[in-house]
Every structure is written in C-alpha cells, then in structure tokens.
C-alpha cells in the first residue's frame, strides 16, 4: 500500500527551479532513499512534504489525505516527523526535553490543567516522560537525559533528532542526512537503528550521501538531478542505470 | 490647496529629519542586529551641543553665517560621533556575544543614562536656540511661501543622505559596511575587519543624528532633554517602515512618515499626531511584514 | 542544594510575612509597589522570558485592566475585586485582537509594534476615547476593595492583599512553567522551525502566551486601580514597560526567583537612593548597562527543569 504519494511537485525560488515535476511513491513499511548530487533539490522535496515550504504546483498525499497546503505541526500530528540536515535541536534545553517536544502533539492538557495540576495532566505527563525515556533508550542515548543538547557530540545530536521525531509517534519518518558528521561505527549503529525503526512498522524516507548506507538500508531509491527525478528502483537497478551513473555516480567515482 | 502644500513642505522637512535619524538606527541594526535605543539621545545631545557651541563661539557672527553654520555642523557631528563610538565601546561591545535581549536592556540603560546626563547638565526646562541664525523670512516658491529654515533643513538633510548613499554604494568602506550587514561571518572571512565596520557605523550614525539635532534646534528654536525619545521612536518607526537594515528604506520611511504625520495632524486630528506614525506602521506591517523595501529573510532549513 | 534554597525561601517568606509590623507605612507602600511590579514582571516573563517574544508595550495591558476596573467600578459600583476576572478578560481580549495580525512579525518588528500599541493606547486614554477615560486627568474615586466585608485601605492591608495575589501567581506560574505549556513556549523561544517541526502549533502558543500574560497584567491593573483610587494615562507610559522589561531580563529571563529579585532591585532599591534625587535616574541607567555586562544572563537565570528519572541516583528529582 502507498503511504506517501507525491505528484508533479514543483517549487522555484526566484528564478531557480529547485524541484521540477517530481513524482514518486513511498510504500508503507519501506525504507526509501532519496539521492542525488548536491543542489539536486532533495531537501526542498522534504521541505515540501513537511510543509516548511509551499509547493508552486503538485500534490502531496499521505494515506490518501491531501496535505499539500497544511501547516507543519498538523502534518506532524497526522504522522510525518522529520529531522533536519542542519541539526535543529533546542540547544539550551536538556536532551530529555528535546524528546518531550516530540511527545507534545500526542498530549492534550492546556495551561489551566497545568496550573491546577489535574490528575489527567499528571497522568499524561508521566506517560510522556516514559515515552521520551524509551525513545532515548531506543536510539542509544539512555543516561544522557539531563545533558544540554548542545553538549552532545555531533553524532549523538543526530540521534537525538531521530528520537525527537520518533516521539511524535509517526507513521513516516523523514531523515535528512542522518549520517552526516558521523564516524564509521556511528554510521554502522545508525543502519541498525534504521532497521529497528522499520521493525516498529514505521516507514522511512531518507536523504544520504553515504552510498554504502543507502545501498544497505534502503530497498527503494529515488534519484534526483537538477530538481527532476531521473531514476527510481531497487538499489541494484539504480546502480546499473546509465543515467544515474552519468549524472551522479560517474561524477563521484 | 495652499494649506496642503504648506503641510507637505513641512512634512518633507520633518520627514527628512526622521530619515537622518533613522539612518543611524538602520545602519547599526544592519551590522549588529541591535536596536540602539541610545540613538535618540545622541540626537538630543547634538541639539544641545549645537546650542552650546553657538552661544560660546558665535561663529556665525565671526566668520559669516554660511561658513559659520558649516563649521558648527561639522563640530557637532564630530563630537556626537565620538560619543556614539564611546557608547558602542562601553555599553554594546561587551555584550556582543550575549543574548540579544540583554543587549537591548543595556541599550535602554544607555539611553536613560544619556537623557538624564543632559537633564543634569542643562536642566529639565526647555532651552531656547539663539535667534537670527537663519533669516526669518519666507521664499516664494511658485506662489507658495516657504520659510527659509524649512528649505535649509530639507536641503541639508537631503545632501547628507545623498552623501551617505554615495559613500555606501561607491567606496570600498561602504561596500564593507554593506557586506557586514548581509553576513558578518562571511564578511570576516573575506578579510573585512568587522570591528572597524561597527566602529564606523557608530561614528556615521550618531554624526547624522547629531546633525539632525542641530537642524531641529534651528527649525523649532527650542529643545528639551526628552525630545530624543519622541524623535527617536518616530525615526525607529521610519527605519522599520522602510525595512530595517535597508539604507534607502530608512530614507524613504522617514520622509513618508513625516509627510503622513504632517498631513494627518492637519486634516485628521492634532491630538492624535504622535499616534499616527504607529498606526501607519502597524497597517503597513500587516500588509508587508518586512517593511516597504525590506527583503524577506528566508529561514534556511 | 534544593533543600538549601527552600530553606532560604522559607526565611525570606517568613520575614516578608511579618515585615509590615516593623516598617512605617511609606516603606510598606514601597513593598506594595515591588509586589505589583513582581506580578507584572512575572506576567511579562511568560511572554518575554519563556516565549522569547519581544514585548516592550506591556504597560498597555496593565492599563486596560486598570481602566476597565476604574470605569466599571465608578460607573456601575461593581466591587473592584469582583472585577478581577473581567479585567483579565478585557486585557486578554485586547491582547488577542492586537496580537493576531502582528504576532508573526520578526522579533524587532514586534518590539516597535508593541511600543506603538502602548503609545497609541496612552494617547487614546489622554484624548478621552469614547468619553469614558477622563482624558489626561484620568478617573478618580475608585472604591477600596473589600474582603469578606473588611475594607482594605491602609498600606499594610494592601500589603497582604498584594502579597496573597503574588503568592498565588508564583504558585500557578511555577506549575505552568513545569508543564507541557511551559515547555512548548520554551521550544518556541529556542527554535521556532524546530518547534513547529516537532508538532507544536507555534502561532497558537505565541498567541496563547501573549494573551495569558496580558490577562495577568490586567488583573494587576485592577489591584493597582484599587490601591491608587485614581488613575491617569501617565501611569502607563513607555517607561513602565521599560521597567517591566528590565525586571525580567535583568532578574533572569524565564526564572521566577530572578523576576522577583529584579522587581526588588528595580522598584525597591531606587527608593533607598532617594537622597540622590536628580542623579538617581542617571545611576539607574548606568546600573542597567553594568549589570547586563556583569550578569549577561540575568542575576538568577532560568534553571533546567527536573524530572523524576528512574535508575540509581537518577539525574533528576521531583520537579
């Protein structure tokens, strides 16, 4: 079944066509990779899906719902969470509170309940705390809850972003260069984490420059160049595609 | 119709003063992203210095009215510029890496300090400018009698603005200022001494503000230690109106604000004069959240 | 650590509870002003300290509360304390109406617009808008508050009224800080894009925190009107907004003890230097600069929230 369906997505900035008529599907339960040379428009595609940018044309369907013009927080609540290429954590808050941000959209209590500290609010708070701790353990950051986010290593910060995204209880997570800045061991562990995300039944769409990771983790790959989709298929098929070799792999040995 | 054109020329003169002050706000904001709340008080100090220098040297009597005023203006501008640089050194530089709201409180503190310093030195009452600096006659402009001082104010302000614009656009240092306003880190990597740019901005802005103070003193004849707040807020409004950080925007915003205010207080209500600027600001920001000439800064994601 | 500070707060509380017995009415009144500004500072702290919204026009909401109380009390003889919720509502509504179109503005744009709103309101009050604000002279003859038939009149009686209101404010705001709402506005302050991307409705929270802070300032306005019995536009000038803002930033953004200390320093301490008279404000301005340079984050900055963590010696503790 198709979870996410992009049709004819187009976005230009000024005169520059960043994304041009891009269409592809993400099947439920899959790990899909979006690759392409720098400036191919990968992150823009992500921003269009998550509502950070408005598409000029085209539609984004998620579970059959047209979310093209939705605001980001509603899209998150519907079930799409993301990480950012340029790490965007709440640097001065604790690791735990960064993950609790993800729990926010599954909670309900407002300011009045907070001031009165109603049983409902307390129960909810306790559940959120447990969930946040579980997500931190899931990505391997248990024990660092009270550290400030800015004091984590680069690789750990990327994991923290993943934990925050998972805490929103998504159906689809979008990872923008999750291995960026990671060393070999961290990358290997990340591949494991992506596998375990999949085991939880969560679909993954990711951008990554580390080809080894992409080939290992993804079962479907979409290739962009100059804002257009030039190939799509299994890792083997994409690797053998002459257009991809010429446009992308050819230039980077 | 006569009334309308009178108000229009008045608005242009006041607006050009707003514009001169607004340039100081906008240039500082451009490089430091800081609202220099003390700027309005530097303007006040310009007005008071002008008065003191006039009274003590009477240059216009010794070396002639024209040359006298030019020398006077240069002295005022120079002194206020030095003061501006001192304010930067003491109140802003130590806070450059701090949370932005901390710098704002420091700026407010500097403003309170300067305003009260003026009050302690000159007293809380209105002070009167020496008379006879500019002939108190009107000039016939196509059937419209415009006071000489108004024309002088307009002419001097426009000349200063044109000078600044040429300096910013055509010179190497001007280019450095523009570059630092766009991206301080990139400018530093390109070998621009950002500290010098900041210092320069804190010399030029206050110099223009001081000149504006002198012009206000000459046009209205009386000054008060709190005038910097009213003029400062209007000028800051003008800078925002034009799109803060944008030099032509500050000029446009200032002149526009002066004209709207003059016409508004003449035709709508004088009692609401000081509110008009803010009404205009809010309306324009609702339509154009970045001001008239301000560009949208896209958040890089 | 935690116990020690609790102990300190306990001592301060006990000292303040009996303070009026040892102070003359003048100094009790100074403390009353400190208390009022503490409440105002705490309400602004939600907006500026917690949400990072640049509000330099908080006096406007204070004014709306005070004038609502004054008008309804003098025209319809409604007891001032009954008007607390009405003043909260009026100030909150006013904030909601003006904030809706401007709240998305970039920080410094929001700053000048809030200054502008404060000025427009002050000018409107001076111009006797709708013929109900009494123009530059304001409104006089506001009645004293009564609690269970007991009329509150003298400074030390107001002391306990304001003290009680402050205590309730601290209690409720402390809970609010340590909640989903409190965290949400902090996320907003730290990184708006990331907050939205984590599923937080940033525009909703900006508006909500603005309205909540304004409503609280409105209630403080009610108490102020009752205390003064006469109010005029000049009590709600830009200067008042500057004081509230400085209390928050200098005391410690987002920190309740910081804001309380800020109120003491900004409102209480200048009274101690009354002998300097003219030079007082000069010193005040210089002190603002020096304090900001020495304690950039404020005197008592916000501390991380604590959470009950499991495991040996869990890093947290009860909030």
Image: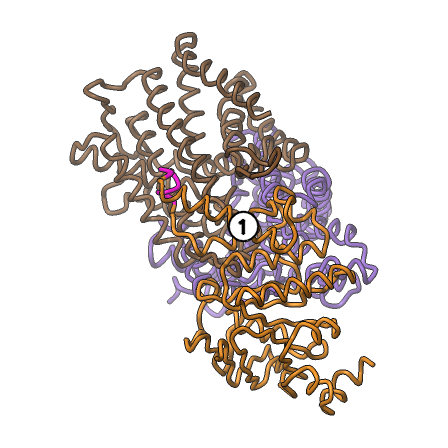
Chain colours: A orange, B purple, C brown
- Where B299 falls versus B101 (above or below)? below
The answer for which chain carries disc 1 is: A
Asked where in the image residue B287 lies, by quadrant, the reply is bottom left
Q: Residue at x 75, y 58 (%)?
A: B185
Does the stretch in magenta take in A116? yes
Name the residue furthest top: C22
Q: Nearer the viewer, residue A140 or B225?
A: A140
Residue at screen point 57% across, 50% down: A98
Q: Which residues are magenta?
A: A111-117
Residue C292 in view, yes or no: yes
Q: Is residue B224 visible?
A: no
State left or right for residue A5 relative to residue A248.
left
B167 is within the stretch colored magenta = no
| Percent of width and height locating residue C154 | 31, 16
Mark 1 lies on a secondary structure that is helix
Q: Residue at x 51, y 75 (%)?
A: A28
Is B125 left, or right, of C80 in this rendering? right
Q: Which residue is mark 1?
A: A132
Picture coordinates of residue C51 (x, y %)?
50, 47
Q: Nearer the viewer, residue B3 or A187?
A: A187
Q: Residue at x 74, y 75 (%)?
A: A211
Residue A189 percent coordinates (x, y): 71, 61
Q: Is residue A233 above or below residue B66?
A: below
- The outermost residue toward the left is C76
Dominant secondary structure, magenta: helix
């Amino acid at each position: 079944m198709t979870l996410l369906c992009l049709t004819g997505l187009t976005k230009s900035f000024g005169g520059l066509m960043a994304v041009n008529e891009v269409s592809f599907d993400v099947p439920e339960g899959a790990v899909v990779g979006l690759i392409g040379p720098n400036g191919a428009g990968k992150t823009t595609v992500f921003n269009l899906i998550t509502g950070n940018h408005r598409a000029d044309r085209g539609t984004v369907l998620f579970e059959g719902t047209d979310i093209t013009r939705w605001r980001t927080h509603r899209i998150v609540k519907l079930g799409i969470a993301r990480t950012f290429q340029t790490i965007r954590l709440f640097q001065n808050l604790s690791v735990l509170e960064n993950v609790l941000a993800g729990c926010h959209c599954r909670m309900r209590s407002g300011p009045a309940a907070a001031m009165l500290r109603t049983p409902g609010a307390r129960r909810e708070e306790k559940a959120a705390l447990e969930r946040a701790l579980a997500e931190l353990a899931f990505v391997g950051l248990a024990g660092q809850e009270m550290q400030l986010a800015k004091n984590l290593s680069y690789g750990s910060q990327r994991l923290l972003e993943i934990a925050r995204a998972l805490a929103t209880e998504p159906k689809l997570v979008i990872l923008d260069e999750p291995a960026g800045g990671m060393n070999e061991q961290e990358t290997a562990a990340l591949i494991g984490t992506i596998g375990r995300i999949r085991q939880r039944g969560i679909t993954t769409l990711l951008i990554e420059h580390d080809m080894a990771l992409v080939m290992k983790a993804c079962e479907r790959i979409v290739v962009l160049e100059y804002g257009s989709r030039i190939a799509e298929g299994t890792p083997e098929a994409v690797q053998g595609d002459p257009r991809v070799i010429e446009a992308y792999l050819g230039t980077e040995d | 119709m006569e009334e309308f054109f009178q108000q229009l020329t008045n608005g242009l003169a006041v607006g050009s003063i707003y514009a001169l002050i607004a340039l100081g706000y906008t240039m500082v904001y451009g490089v430091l992203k800081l609202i220099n709340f003390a700027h309005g008080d530097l303007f006040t100090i310009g007005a008071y210095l002008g008065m003191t220098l006039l009274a003590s040297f009477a240059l216009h009597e010794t070396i002639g009215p024209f040359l006298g005023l030019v020398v006077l203006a240069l002295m005022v501008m120079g002194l206020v510029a030095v003061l501006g640089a001192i304010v930067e050194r003491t109140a802003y530089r130590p806070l450059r890496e701090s949370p932005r709201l901390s710098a704002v409180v420091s700026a407010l503190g500097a403003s309170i300090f300067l305003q009260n310093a003026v009050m302690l030195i000159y007293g809380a009452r209105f002070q009167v400018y020496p008379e006879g600096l500019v002939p108190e006659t009107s000039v016939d402009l196509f059937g419209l009698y415009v006071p000489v001082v108004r024309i002088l104010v307009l002419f001097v302000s426009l000349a200063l603005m044109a000078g600044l614009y040429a300096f910013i656009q055509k010179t190497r240092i001007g280019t450095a200022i523009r570059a630092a306003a766009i991206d301080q880190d990139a400018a530093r990597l390109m070998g621009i001494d950002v500290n010098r740019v900041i210092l320069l901005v804190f010399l030029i802005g206050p110099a223009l503000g001081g000149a504006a103070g002198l012009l206000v003193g000459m046009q209205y004849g009386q000054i008060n230690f709190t005038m910097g707040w009213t003029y400062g807020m209007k000028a800051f409004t003008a800078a925002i109106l034009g799109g803060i950080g944008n030099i032509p925007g500050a000029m446009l915003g200032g002149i526009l604000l002066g004209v709207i205010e003059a016409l508004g207080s003449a035709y709508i209500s004088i009692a609401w004069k000081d509110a008009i600027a803010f009404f205009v600001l809010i309306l324009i920001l609702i339509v154009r959240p970045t001001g008239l000439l301000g560009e949208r800064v896209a958040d890089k994601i | 650590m935690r116990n020690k500070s609790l102990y300190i707060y306990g001592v301060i509380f006990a000292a303040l509870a009996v303070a009026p017995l040892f102070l003359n009415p003048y100094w009790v009144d100074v403390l009353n002003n400190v208390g009022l500004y503490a409440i105002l500072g705490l309400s602004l702290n939600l907006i500026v300290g917690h949400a990072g919204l640049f509000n330099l026009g908080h006096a406007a909401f204070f004014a709306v509360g005070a004038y609502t109380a004054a008008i309804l009390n003098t025209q319809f003889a409604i007891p001032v304390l009954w008007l607390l919720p009405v003043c909260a509502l009026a100030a909150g509504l006013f904030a909601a109406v003006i904030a809706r179109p401007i709240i998305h503005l970039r920080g410094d744009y929001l700053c000048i617009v809030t200054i502008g709103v404060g000025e427009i309101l002050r000018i409107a009050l001076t111009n006797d808008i709708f013929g109900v604000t009494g123009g530059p002279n304001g409104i006089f003859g506001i009645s004293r508050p009564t609690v269970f038939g007991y009329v509150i009149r003298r400074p030390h009686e107001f002391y306990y009224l304001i003290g009680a209101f402050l205590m309730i404010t601290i209690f409720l705001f402390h809970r609010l800080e340590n909640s989903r709402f409190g965290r949400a506005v902090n996320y907003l302050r730290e990184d708006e894009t990331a907050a939205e991307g984590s599923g937080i409705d940033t525009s909703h929270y900006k508006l909500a925190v603005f309205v909540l802070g304004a409503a609280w300032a409105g209630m403080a306005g009610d108490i102020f009107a009752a205390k003064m019995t006469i109010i005029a536009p000049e009590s709600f000038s830009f200067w008042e907004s500057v004081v509230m803002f400085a209390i928050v930033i200098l005391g410690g953004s987002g920190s309740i003890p910081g804001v309380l200390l800020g109120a003491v320093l900004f409102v209480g301490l200048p009274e101690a230097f009354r002998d300097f008279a003219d030079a007082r404000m000069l010193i005040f301005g210089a002190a603002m600069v020096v304090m900001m340079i020495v304690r950039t984050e404020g005197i008592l900055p916000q501390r991380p929230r604590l959470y009950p963590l499991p495991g040996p010696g869990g890093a947290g503790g009860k909030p």
